[in-house]
Amino acid sequence: MAENKKHSEHSHKSHEDHLRETHLMLDPMPRGKMNEMVMESMHTTSWKFWAVFALLSVIVAWGLFYSWGRLILEGVGIAGVNRPSYWGIFLVNTVFWIGISHAGTFISAILRVFKAEFRRPFTRAAELMTTFGLVQAGFSIFMHMGRVWLSYWLFPIPNQRQLWPNFHSPLSWDLLAITTYLLSSTMYLFLPLIPDLAMARDRSTGWRKTFYKILALGFRGTEGEWTHLRNALNIFAFAIIPVMFSVHTIVSWDFAMATRPGWSSTIFGPYFVIGALHSGMGAVVMVLAVVRGTMKNMNYFIRPEHFEAIGKLMLIISMGWAYFFFNDYIVQWYGGDKWTKTLLHWHEAGPMGWMWFAMLIFNVAIPWAILWNKKWRSTPWLIFIVGLLINVGMWFERYIIVPISLSINRMPFTWRLYEPGIEIPLGIGTLAFFVLLYMAASKLIPLVPVWEVQEGHMDHSLKKFGRETVVTVSDLE
Amino acid sequence: MTQERTLLAVFSDIDPAADALDQLRLMGVHDEHMNIISGIPVTEAMLGRPSQWTNVPRLALGGAAGGMLIGIFLAFISPNMYTIEVGGQPFTPVPPAVIVIFELTMLGMLLSTFLGVFLDSYFPSYRPMKYVPEISDGKIGILIEFPLPDEKKVTEVLKKLGAESVQYTEAQHL
Amino acid sequence: MSEKISRRDFLKLASVGAATTAVLTGCGPASRYVTREPYTKMPEYTYNGLSTYYATTCRECAAACGLIVRTMQGRAIKVEGNKGNPVNLGKTCARGQATLHGLYNPDRVENPVQQGRAKNFATEAMTWDAAVQVVADAFKNNDPSEIGFLLGMAPDHLFDLVSDLAKSVGAPAPVRFGVLSMFESRATLSKAAENLLGQSGMPFFDVGGSDIVLSFGANFLETWLSPVAYTRGFAKLRRGDPKHRGYFIQFESRMSLTASRADEWIPILPGTEGLVALAIGRLVAEAKGGAVPRAFASVDPAAVATQAGVSLEKLEHAATLILDAQHPLAIPGGAALGQSNGLFTAEAVLAFNALLDNFNQTGGVYLSPLAPNQDEYHRPASAQEMTDFIEKMKSGAVKVLFVHGVNPVFELPKSLGFAEALASVPQVISFATFPDETALASDYIFPDHHGLESWGYQRVVTGTTQSTLSGAQPVVSPYFNTRATADVLIAAAQSAGGKFAEALPFADEVDFIQSKLAGLVGQEGSFLAPEINTFAAYFQQHGGWWKKDAETQVITASNALSKSLKVAPAEFAGEGEFYFLPFVSPTLAEAGANKPWLQELADPTTTVMWNTWVEINPETAHELHLENDDVVKIISEAGEVEAPVYVYPAIRPDTIAMPFGQGHTAYGRYAQGRGANPADVLGQHFNEAGDLAFAGMRVKVEKTGVKKILSRLESRIGVYGEGMGEEH
Amino acid sequence: MVRKFFEWIISPMGRIAALIAGLSLFTLAAYGVFTLQQSPEQPIQFRHDIHVNLQVQCLYCHPGALRGASPGLPTLTKCWGCHQQIAKTDTSPRLAVLKDYIANGKDIAWVPVAQVPDFVHFNHRPHIAAGVNCEDCHGDMSVQEIAVNPQVMNMGWCLNCHKEKAGDDEVKLTKLTDCGTCHY
Amino acid sequence: MTVDLNKLHAVGAIAEEAEGKWGMVIDQDLCTGCQACVAACAMENNIAFVGEEDAGYGRSMHWIRTERFWEGEYPEVRMTDYQPMLCQQCGKAPCEPVCPAFATVHSQAEKINLQVYNRCVGTRYCANNCPYQVRSFNWRDYQDSRIRPEITILANQFNPDVTVRRRGVMEKCTFCIQRIHKAQDKAKSEGREVEDGEFTTACAQACPASAITFGRIDHPESLVSQLARMPHTQHHLEELGTLPSVTYLKGA
């Protein structure tokens, strides 16, 4: 039997079947049926979902809102920040979440610009991460502030004092950039969602109908509407890329502009951007694996070919990250500045040295070891683990950059270790809130951009070149 | 009253719909009196329709210019309203200004692009509209406005060309 | 308290809606408007937002530094030094600065209370009339010879009043004690002066005029005698002569704050300070040529060097420096005197000074002048004398004991048994301002005002060569329902009638003080007043009265060198591998533990805050498998005490040191239950002058396995290079 | 249910209702803030207009303004200094409070009306030295009965005057707009 | 051809001087580490004490601290000179530009570095960027009587000239700006200039060894200027170009 099967794979006909089976774009389905599948995935909710949902709600209520309330009322003292580590896990989490948010834009904008077709079924899943990740990043920043109730002073609001924010400060740039990015990525999430919301509107009843009706804004799919939408999406796809780069570059400038050993580095901008993509892609893979594994009908839309493609990207990004890391390291090391050298030594041989090595293993060694193999990177559970480790590794990287590097400064009398306090429930709270938002969204909006998949189905076909049958893509747009 | 009625023909594929449009045009229905609604983006070229006018790119440019002006205001004018010296830096240094102006330009551009879609498409609109839900299942609908040259003939032609249904439609709550 | 609200209390007023309203007003209050309650009934001029400055005297130790206190709307805001006062010339130490935290301490005795020797502080108030009656009854119902007075080192006017009272009614003279004077070994110093110079008095060492200082254990930059004056002297030593920077060598087994400022710190074996002084003296004498004086003839420098654990070169180097110097000076003090051979050490160092021929010279040794209204120098009780007093208490010869300004239950070594003796006294009346250990063990607490609310004067014993009487006056009206002890005693004496009333024929405390100042009217000094009222007014205004010129007792030291000194080796009590060195915490001293900002100050050498530590040499710690913050038990023959380890790089490996100042079991929330008291392990051993041989103990160290993280200001990484192996 | 509400809220009636609801919420909030800004009642209903019209100088009762930061509020001794000689003291019901204070030896807990927050260190002396009159900030007291604060004393108000007074004098402008002049 | 470095704004190539007004000189050879300055500063400026646990965790609020280091091992161990470290009032302060709310700014009138408490939102960026690590943050409501009831009594001592800070606010040495203002106000009311030595900061006033001197650094004849011109002076971390106003006198 096995031999037979192996043999049959070589035959022309079954190869075509194989291609159709593995490629979503060659496996078309009537639009109505596909809609049905997507709607079904939203409606089918097991008790496990609700159990996890309830658990996460409790965690969010305790970890995020109760702890945050305490933080505001009692002061930042209940966190672990101290002199000299004035910035702690709050900033680590901010950078981390902004990093996560980069994947959405990367997948749906850059891949859209470059017409990478494998993106189609999961652009929305990635874009949701952008928006929800930025929400957590915003939370983390505001948690960090000593007097968050005055944070409106950081925004350029006309006032009787005629005192505006200080645009010399990287934090001001940061705030502008993150606001811009949050707004644009939310808009970029919403625009391609409109046709799918209209679809959902047409196929629902009860409160869901009203909900989708409000959100679909009265979309019918006229030529005009499609034209405006496509134009807007093209503008967005191009314009949001520099915004994305600027955001994480500016985040890196929060550190790089400071006069601290180890931070003042010109390569921090690209280093942070690639780090963000690294953790972002890892997170996308994790989300996709979970979505595919838990939601009904999703194994139709998300297939090993997608993991394979993302895995390739992850491998490249991991190499890029290693390149930038080494670049930053060797320049600092070679410079030989007393404090910088102390800091590097502290990273490796200090009490938190294990974290430095773990970072390198998780970010470089493990991805390189696993992702080179096509079969391995097509395996959802394996790539899920790689994604998870990359995210842990990237979190470690930010932890090393923020509190561990802050322990060392030019005043040795003040060197001191940082021990997190309430940051931990708050960090868990943001994580839980992210998952919670995602879970809610998965039940409220179509996670798969049906119209884009359909559009893709029109683009793809099989073509024979001599004895070989290959997949071709036509340029419709 | 009859003037306001609309005929809706539903097709399940692009080619018959394109043929139907050609036929209608031959029968004297003006392009302006026809509208296509579809669940996936079917381009004008596919159906042989004149291309649609859109203001989105222009609005985006305008928004970018507006955002830039706000950026310039924030970067170069607002610091002069209450002059405060920090770290020996000038009141209005150029490099940070580049960042501020860039961010606000992009924000202006993207916001106005987004709003441009709303403006051009008359979003949000919750008024009753002529529509059938099958459109979102992948059908292509042709809305033909009255007055028609010959209602019966039109219906017949459309049916012959593969229209799944041809019927008068009334605006309804979506 | 809540109705007493003023402008600066705004921020405290934000109520439940703080977060919401703060959005609107920044750091502002919940309500824009607050009611402005007057603090007390105050005269018009204090209510106009302008500060008023009052001169008074610091009561944190007995050095009598003059203060100028800035007050505003009836509150004392800031302590500044009185530039006129010759002791401190406008400067203050940390403890003086923090005296305001004593004044506005949340744990003061707010009312007279019947404590009844309860374990916890009694809070039920009595009336002052009843309190005065209790004192009057105590006077009347006891035979005067059975009345005991135990007073602290400050204030002097109260000591004078009680002395007068005791003398008139035939009661024993008041016993005066202070833990600082115990650690300063004042009795030893004056006894040495008497033995060697034939003159009693407190020697004053002119560090500022000198160009090389050899200090044998004297911690004169910390708490010793008059720290502000000596610190000024130190500054003058360093920078007084722009061309020549004075040199300073400290011989001490542990690097104290004083030693840390020395150019050379020479860790010698405890108890060999006297020998080292003699050895250097001999080297100097030999180099000078001529006959070696008798006092020095018997020592062999090489042998001494071996015995003290120091290289002979170091001693020779010190001798060379002295020979080159114009004004060499040697100071005995600190732990060197708190040895069984402390008197010998003091004599040896004084003899060394005699050899250097610096008596009555700039940069030399003086005998401090008597204060203006003083007939003779009243030395505080030595530990030996306190032991005698304790015996007397135990024997039942004291029927009623009045305690003021001193806390012997905490301060005296437990082995002396003061607490038990106190229990055998039928009636104990405390005048404590704070609920300290002794006050809690009393029948009544009739709280005195805080020093800044009090009238009085303090004599300058040492610290300046000008004869000085530093004056005190209330800078604010009393915050609590307290009453001046002098007033209570006067009122009680008059109520008791008879010879008591005759002994104190004064209207009140101020009346008494003026009677004591009467002798100075018309004398030439910092001001000249023709009659007592003018004098009293100027006295308040200037913060005291002092002679304009230096006026020291002339020392006739002709026979100092010819005397042969009996070389006494130090004896150490108990068993154990370590010499135990208790020292007074430079920031807390005797009474600082209840002042939160003093607790928060980093100890200068270790930077530890809010706790007690045990200093152990790194090598020793390594041998004993001890690390920082390991709690160890220190066991002596007299007791044991537990404290965390501070691995201190600058202490002899055979010595462990521990600061005195913490370990209170009462004394308010900031002091209670914090740290440990090294006095708990001190035994009943005295030197020949009767001072406690506090540094004459051997102790064992045991690891308890418990860890208590010491709060340090310093980095544990950057200062020692732990875990880094690089830089610093 | 949800749908019906939605349909209603997008209808003209619904929109008006939503507007009214929003407005009333805002009014409620504004009223809440307003009540926080009201001064508590003065212990003595002191009539500024009567005293000013009797030619009592401001600096008589608030002498600190001339010399220092705080003008001071008069204590009982100052009031009684005049009032014990005035016949009206015995008859006026408003002055009964004052007599009561005197009799019981209480001090007057005035409620200051013209206040700046704790983090603003306002000093009266330089303002008076610069020729600013009391009424420029505190209003005309000869027409006020119980003193009220005539204006919002916020930073913009301070700055406007500071800039105006500084004019073209760079040094003065620097000093008068320096953050550290008022905030420390 | 010669290049005029001034024209090129070649910062660092030529010695730069801070455009200072007030300056401080600290003689480390005199400092005995006695903490009088710390206590005086705390009393003058209403600085909160934080308690044992927070103090040990690097949250003490000292505006001035005495640093010391160890060199060598027993018996040749040496303690370096005590180094009082306080805000250096940099001419080009790294803390200032990074504050997004203009809460720490350079006073153009007094030429010192201001911390405007009421404007502070607590990002703590300034403290991160301070190379001297002399800024302290109000981690908790240390001076709120609802959290520490005893403050009600201790608050009687508070200096009304200095704002009491609440949680979430950065603070630091102000060169006792309240005293500067007071002296200037007094001098102005008497129609004269502030004299050298007429007033001083709380730390300098208390220092028993007179190791701290404060005054007009821009008046060449003032004591502080004369001391700052002595040969063995040092500015901390001068290489960062912060132009500190505090000068240290080292060693003999």
Image: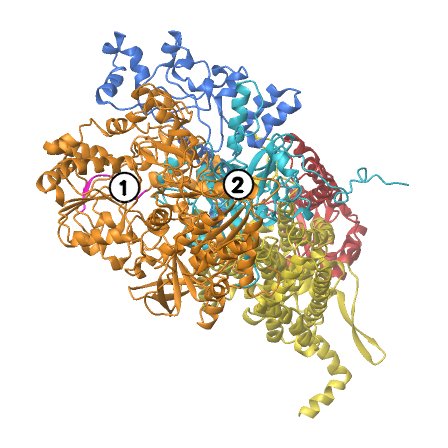
Query: For residue B47: magenta?
Result: no
Q: Secondary structure at mark 2?
A: helix
Chain that is cyan in the image = E
Question: Which region shows up in magenta?
Answer: C106-115
Q: Is residue C574 left or right of residue D68?
A: left
Residue D83, above or below B161: above
Q: Amino acid at mark 1?
A: Thr
Q: Secondary structure at mark 1?
A: loop
Q: Main secondary structure of the magenta part?
A: loop
Q: Chain of mark 1?
A: C
Chain that is red in the image = B
Query: For residue C114: magenta?
Result: yes
Task: Indicate the quadrant containing the N terminus of chain C: top left, top right, bottom left or bottom right.
Answer: top left
**Foreground: B88 or A109?**
B88
Q: Residue at x 30, y 52 (%)?
A: C411
**Foreground: C211 or B78?**
C211
Q: Is residue A101 left or right of residue C435?
A: right
Residue C334 seen anywhere in this rendered image of the structure = yes
Q: Report the residue marked by disc 1.
A: C433
In this view, the residue farthest toward the left is C141
**Foreground: B61 or D146?**
D146
Task: Indicate the quadrant containing the C terminus of chain C: top left, top right, bottom left or bottom right.
Answer: bottom right
